[in-house]
Image (cartoon, grey):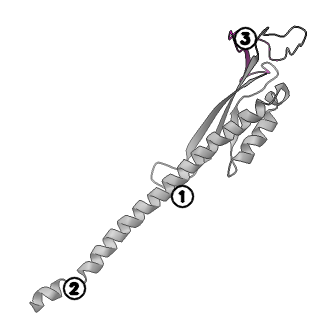
Amino acid sequence: MKANARDEQGQALVETALSMSLLILIMLGAVEFGMFTFAAIEVSNSAKAAAQYGAQNHGTALNTAGMLAAAQNEYYSTGLTMTSPVITAGAPTAGYTCTCAGSGAAVSCTDNSVASPPCAGSYVQVQIKVATQATFNPGIHVAGISSITLHGNAVQMVLQ
Protein backbone atom coordinates (compact mmCIF):
# COMPACT_ATOMS: atom_id res chain seq x y z
CA MET A 1 0.00 0.00 0.00
CA LYS A 2 2.77 2.45 0.87
CA ALA A 3 4.61 1.68 -2.37
CA ASN A 4 1.60 2.75 -4.46
CA ALA A 5 1.17 5.98 -2.49
CA ARG A 6 4.76 7.02 -3.15
CA ASP A 7 4.40 6.41 -6.89
CA GLU A 8 1.45 8.82 -7.07
CA GLN A 9 2.97 11.73 -5.14
CA GLY A 10 3.00 14.88 -7.27
CA GLN A 11 0.70 13.45 -9.93
CA ALA A 12 -2.04 16.00 -9.20
CA LEU A 13 0.48 18.82 -9.41
CA VAL A 14 1.67 17.67 -12.85
CA GLU A 15 -1.92 17.30 -14.13
CA THR A 16 -2.82 20.76 -12.84
CA ALA A 17 0.23 22.34 -14.47
CA LEU A 18 -0.56 20.74 -17.83
CA SER A 19 -4.25 21.63 -17.76
CA MET A 20 -3.62 25.22 -16.58
CA SER A 21 -1.17 25.89 -19.40
CA LEU A 22 -3.79 24.71 -21.91
CA LEU A 23 -6.49 26.79 -20.21
CA ILE A 24 -4.29 29.92 -20.26
CA LEU A 25 -3.53 29.39 -23.95
CA ILE A 26 -7.24 29.11 -24.76
CA MET A 27 -8.01 32.25 -22.74
CA LEU A 28 -5.28 34.25 -24.52
CA GLY A 29 -6.71 33.14 -27.86
CA ALA A 30 -10.19 34.27 -26.82
CA VAL A 31 -8.86 37.69 -25.74
CA GLU A 32 -6.97 38.08 -29.02
CA PHE A 33 -10.07 37.12 -31.03
CA GLY A 34 -12.10 39.67 -29.06
CA MET A 35 -9.57 42.42 -29.78
CA PHE A 36 -9.61 41.53 -33.49
CA THR A 37 -13.42 41.58 -33.59
CA PHE A 38 -13.54 44.93 -31.80
CA ALA A 39 -11.08 46.45 -34.29
CA ALA A 40 -13.09 45.11 -37.25
CA ILE A 41 -16.31 46.61 -35.86
CA GLU A 42 -14.58 49.94 -35.28
CA VAL A 43 -13.32 50.08 -38.89
CA SER A 44 -16.86 49.45 -40.17
CA ASN A 45 -18.32 52.03 -37.78
CA SER A 46 -15.78 54.61 -38.92
CA ALA A 47 -16.83 54.07 -42.55
CA LYS A 48 -20.45 54.61 -41.52
CA ALA A 49 -19.55 57.82 -39.65
CA ALA A 50 -17.75 59.16 -42.73
CA ALA A 51 -20.68 58.28 -45.00
CA GLN A 52 -23.14 59.98 -42.66
CA TYR A 53 -20.98 63.09 -42.60
CA GLY A 54 -20.72 63.12 -46.40
CA ALA A 55 -24.45 62.62 -46.90
CA GLN A 56 -25.42 65.79 -45.03
CA ASN A 57 -25.42 67.99 -48.12
CA HIS A 58 -23.62 68.49 -51.44
CA GLY A 59 -20.81 70.46 -49.80
CA THR A 60 -19.94 67.80 -47.25
CA ALA A 61 -20.11 65.10 -49.92
CA LEU A 62 -17.06 66.62 -51.58
CA ASN A 63 -15.26 67.31 -48.28
CA THR A 64 -13.04 64.25 -47.98
CA ALA A 65 -11.01 65.88 -45.19
CA GLY A 66 -14.18 66.23 -43.13
CA MET A 67 -15.21 62.65 -43.88
CA LEU A 68 -11.77 61.40 -42.88
CA ALA A 69 -11.92 63.41 -39.65
CA ALA A 70 -15.35 61.93 -38.87
CA ALA A 71 -14.01 58.43 -39.52
CA GLN A 72 -10.91 58.97 -37.41
CA ASN A 73 -12.98 60.40 -34.55
CA GLU A 74 -15.01 57.18 -34.54
CA TYR A 75 -11.98 54.88 -34.66
CA TYR A 76 -10.42 53.88 -31.33
CA SER A 77 -6.77 54.16 -32.37
CA THR A 78 -4.52 55.73 -34.98
CA GLY A 79 -3.71 54.42 -38.43
CA LEU A 80 -7.16 54.55 -40.05
CA THR A 81 -7.24 55.61 -43.71
CA MET A 82 -10.15 56.29 -46.03
CA THR A 83 -9.69 54.57 -49.39
CA SER A 84 -12.93 55.78 -51.00
CA PRO A 85 -14.31 58.21 -52.07
CA VAL A 86 -11.24 59.79 -53.56
CA ILE A 87 -12.30 63.21 -54.83
CA THR A 88 -10.12 64.42 -57.69
CA ALA A 89 -10.39 67.31 -60.13
CA GLY A 90 -11.26 65.00 -63.03
CA ALA A 91 -13.99 63.11 -61.18
CA PRO A 92 -15.35 65.34 -58.42
CA THR A 93 -18.25 63.03 -57.58
CA ALA A 94 -16.51 59.65 -57.38
CA GLY A 95 -18.37 57.61 -54.77
CA TYR A 96 -21.23 60.13 -54.80
CA THR A 97 -24.23 59.59 -57.05
CA CYS A 98 -27.66 61.17 -57.42
CA THR A 99 -30.77 59.53 -58.87
CA CYS A 100 -34.49 60.22 -58.93
CA ALA A 101 -36.15 58.31 -56.09
CA GLY A 102 -39.15 57.24 -58.17
CA SER A 103 -37.57 56.30 -61.49
CA GLY A 104 -33.93 55.67 -60.62
CA ALA A 105 -32.81 57.95 -63.46
CA ALA A 106 -29.37 59.48 -62.93
CA VAL A 107 -29.37 63.25 -62.37
CA SER A 108 -26.77 65.91 -61.68
CA CYS A 109 -25.78 66.20 -58.05
CA THR A 110 -25.14 69.93 -58.40
CA ASP A 111 -28.49 70.89 -59.99
CA ASN A 112 -30.61 72.18 -57.08
CA SER A 113 -32.92 74.43 -59.06
CA VAL A 114 -36.21 75.11 -57.30
CA ALA A 115 -37.78 76.49 -60.50
CA SER A 116 -37.08 73.31 -62.49
CA PRO A 117 -36.17 70.46 -60.13
CA PRO A 118 -34.22 67.57 -61.65
CA CYS A 119 -36.83 65.04 -60.48
CA ALA A 120 -40.26 66.52 -61.08
CA GLY A 121 -42.76 65.05 -58.61
CA SER A 122 -40.07 63.10 -56.77
CA TYR A 123 -37.02 63.55 -54.58
CA VAL A 124 -33.35 63.35 -55.46
CA GLN A 125 -31.81 60.30 -53.83
CA VAL A 126 -28.18 60.96 -52.89
CA GLN A 127 -25.96 57.94 -52.34
CA ILE A 128 -22.45 58.11 -50.99
CA LYS A 129 -20.08 55.15 -50.66
CA VAL A 130 -17.15 55.20 -48.25
CA ALA A 131 -14.43 52.61 -47.70
CA THR A 132 -11.96 52.62 -44.82
CA GLN A 133 -9.09 50.40 -43.81
CA ALA A 134 -6.77 49.91 -40.86
CA THR A 135 -4.01 47.48 -39.93
CA PHE A 136 -4.50 45.23 -36.91
CA ASN A 137 -1.34 44.03 -35.19
CA PRO A 138 -2.05 40.99 -33.02
CA GLY A 139 -0.68 40.98 -29.48
CA ILE A 140 0.23 37.31 -29.78
CA HIS A 141 2.45 36.72 -32.78
CA VAL A 142 1.91 33.50 -34.69
CA ALA A 143 4.29 32.37 -37.39
CA GLY A 144 3.12 33.71 -40.76
CA ILE A 145 0.70 36.30 -39.33
CA SER A 146 2.37 39.63 -38.65
CA SER A 147 -0.54 42.00 -39.28
CA ILE A 148 -4.03 41.92 -40.75
CA THR A 149 -5.62 44.64 -42.89
CA LEU A 150 -9.23 45.31 -41.92
CA HIS A 151 -11.66 46.89 -44.38
CA GLY A 152 -14.87 48.76 -43.68
CA ASN A 153 -17.51 49.80 -46.21
CA ALA A 154 -20.62 51.93 -45.83
CA VAL A 155 -23.33 53.24 -48.13
CA GLN A 156 -25.54 56.11 -47.01
CA MET A 157 -28.62 57.18 -48.96
CA VAL A 158 -30.52 60.41 -48.29
CA LEU A 159 -33.53 61.95 -49.98
CA GLN A 160 -33.14 65.66 -50.78
Question: What is the CA distance from the residue labelled 2 to the residue labelled 1?
Answer: 38 Å
Q: What residue type is labelled 3?
A: Ala
Question: What is the CA distance from the residue labelled 1 to the residue labelled 3?
Answer: 48 Å
Q: Which of marks 2 and 1 is nearer the N terminus?
A: 2
Label placed on residue 139:
1
Residue 48, position as x, y percentages in the image:
68, 37
Find numbered disc 2 in the image and state the secondary structure of the residue it sits on: loop
Image: 97 above or below 81: above
Label placed on residue 106:
3
| Residue at figure coordinates x 33%, y 74% from the top left | 17
| Residue at figure coordinates x 71%, y 46% from the top left | 74
Relative to 138, is 18 on the left or the right? left
Q: Residue furthest front?
A: 121
Q: Residue furthest left?
A: 1
Decide whether the magenta segment is chiefly helix, strand or loop.
loop
Relative to 20, is 160 on the left or the right? right
Total tally of numbered discs in the picture: 3
Residue 122: which quarter of the image?
top right
Marks 1 and 3 in Cβ contact (< 8 Å)? no
Residue 38, position as x, y percentages in the image:
57, 50
Q: Magenta segment range? A: 92-109
> In the rendered image, which residue does mark 2 sit on?
9
Marks 2 and 3 in Cβ contact (< 8 Å)? no
Q: Is residue 101 magenta?
A: yes
